[in-house]
Image (cartoon, helix red, strand yellow):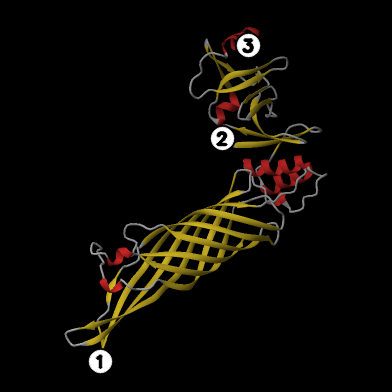
Amino acid sequence: MIARFALVILGYWSFSISFAQTGYIATDTSYISGIELIPGTARDNALFIKVKSNNGETIYSPQEIKEYGFENGKVYVSQAVFPDNPRKRVFLERIEEGKITLFLYAGKEQKSFFLKSDSSTLIKISRKKSEYRKLLLEQTPDFAWKAQQPQLVTYRKQSLAKLISQYNTGKHRPLNFAHLGIRAGYVMSSYKISPKLYELSSPVFDQRLRDIRNGRSSNLLLGVFGEIPIGKNDFSLLIETNYMKGGFSTFSRSTVYDYFIEEFKTFDVDMVVKSSTIQIPLLLRYTLPKLKWRPFVNVGGNFAHHFKNSSRVYQSDITSNVVMMRLPTKENHMSNYTFAYNLGAGLQYNLNYRNMMSAELRYNNQIPTGNAYIVENQLNLLINFTF
């Protein structure tokens, strides 16, 4: 054993392969840092660790060393976790350390978590929801959970780590969890007519629309969404599906002198656009870690499909008080598929430990594409309920 450690000390400064990481290994009597460790899969890391040296690779098992760690902060500790075989040891990843330490074992078939406090032995956490939540309460009797966080914890690394971290630091923070929600909204849209619409090269060229005005409309929106926490922090991923039925109408009026009949002619042009739209926003959200009132901001992109999309142009010619209506023309002046970026901010209120309501103001700015003859920007007022 001493000879193997000597080889490591002599060879740790040698060249390392691309996936080796700087770290350390320790026994009951020795500690060697600055060596090159070669990480494996989660299962491999639970069974052994490879150390790079001039003489190749040296493999250490949980029976030979008590701990190893990487410079990125990951630490693995040798522990006996099998009651029927107390001499067999494995490496447990240390997730959180403090009054209570949380460990993860990446076993052959499934992952397992363990708790250890200063006054207790290693305790395996049951996978049953009612049992592991009861265990967490039993292990934290000196802490008054203000937001019933143990009722929300799941059998996942990030969720358990955040809960144990709150206990160790004595800080009350909301425990983010994956949830679904529904929403209703009021959408104020502005439509900008692109000059491409009356360019000669445009496939929907229409000279009559040169003086057409930009349009506005207000519509209702309905939607569903899912929110997924990202790691231990207060960021989350928001995936949404919204439906809205919209459209607008706009017009232009021009007067020209007809030298042939020596009279003025007036032309009225009306454009009517109707659409039914499915929006699929994908957003990154940050929510301030407060227990009741929680401000948040989000940013992301929005894909929209106008599955019903029609534009009609009506023209009236007025000469000598005689009105002549022309047959309407029908084109798709608005793209069937659009992309936009979203910016939003709002305030969330926690009704209880699971249900929440929030109000949000969100701005959608469409990214013009080659065939976008009408560009839509939106200001949304959204009311959300999660469960």
Quadrant of the snapshot with the N terminus: top right
Q: Position of residue 7 (x, y in %)?
A: 59, 9
Q: Residue at x 24, y 83 (%)?
A: 257
Sequence-wise, which precedes: disc 3 or disc 1? 3
- Closer to viewer: mark 3 or mark 1: 1
Query: What residue sits right under mark 2 in the picture?
Result: 109
As drawn, is 273 to the left or to the right of 86?
left
Question: In screen coordinates, is 247 left or right of 63?
Answer: left
- For the residue marked with disc 2, what is the amino acid? Glu
Disc 2 and disc 3 in contact, CB within 8 angstroms: no
Q: Residues within 10 Å of mark 2 (few under 14, many from 20)?
A: few
Relative to 296, residue 47 above or below: above
Residue extending farthest to the right is: 142
Q: Three-letter amino acid code at disc 1?
A: Ser
In the image, what residue occupies the spot 50% across and 25% down?
19
Tell me the tag on residue 5: 3
Q: Position of residue 228 (x, y in %)?
A: 57, 51
Crowd band around label 3 with a 10 angstrom C-alpha radius: few (<14), some (14–19), many (20+): some
Using the numbered discs, state the Cα–Cα distance from disc 2 to disc 1 in whole angstroms. 88 Å
Identify the residue position indicated by label 1 in the image. Answer: 320
